[in-house]
Image: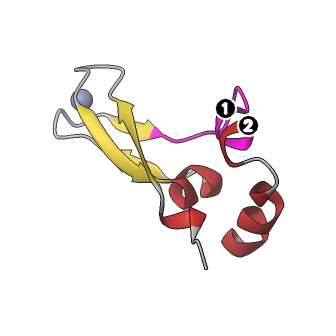
């Protein structure tokens, strides 16, 4: 089975622009990533881009995160 929650995406730190790899599950869970510049990056599916990206899998993914 294709496990979408383990798919990685790259996000940029808003402070130093360093790139971080996070999993879609982390985004769906609203996890926080600590950057080496000591910025805490709160992952959020604000614009729905993650939802769009994973389409119908979103429901299953959210259930998985709970
Ligand atoms: Zn940073």
Contact between labelled residues 1 and 2, with CB atoms less than 8 Å apart? yes
Q: Is residue 7 above or below residue 43?
A: below
Please name the residue shown 70% across and 74% down the image.
Answer: 64
Please name the residue shown 58% across and 63% down the image.
Answer: 4
Q: Is residue 48 magenta?
A: yes
Q: Position of residue 54 (x, y in %)?
A: 68, 49
30, 52: nearer the viewer: 52
Q: Position of residue 39 (x, y in %)?
A: 30, 34
Left or right placement of residue 60 versus residue 25 in this view: right
Q: Position of residue 18 (x, y in %)?
A: 22, 28
**What residue would you read off at disc 2?**
52
Tell me if the residue at label 1 has its CB under 8 Å from ligand 1: no
Q: Which residues are magenta?
A: 42-51
Please name the residue shown 32% across and 28% down the image.
Answer: 13
User: Coloured how?
Assistant: secondary structure
Q: Quadrant of residue 61?
A: bottom right
Disc 2 packing (10 Å; few <14; some 14–19; many ≥20): few
Q: Quadrant of the C terminus?
A: bottom right
Left or right placement of residue 42 versus residue 33 in this view: right
Left or right placement of residue 54 versus residue 12 in this view: right
Instruction: State the CA–CA distance, disc 2 to disc 1.
Output: 5 Å
Q: Is residue 33 above or below residue 62?
A: above
Quarter of the render that holds ligand 1? top left
Secondary structure of the residue carrying numbered label 2: helix
Disc 1 packing (10 Å; few <14; some 14–19; many ≥20): few
Q: Is residue 1 above or below residue 25?
A: below
Q: Is residue 31 magenta?
A: no
**What residue would you read off at disc 1?**
49
């Amino acid at each position: 089975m294709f496990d979408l929650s383990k798919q990685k995406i790259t996000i940029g730190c808003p402070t130093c622009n360093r790139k971080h790899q996070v999993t879609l599950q982390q985004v769906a869970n609203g996890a926080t990533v600590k950057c080496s510049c000591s910025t805490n990056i709160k992952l959020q599916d604000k614009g729905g881009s993650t939802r769009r990206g994973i389409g119908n899998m979103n429901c299953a993914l959210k259930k998985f995160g709970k």
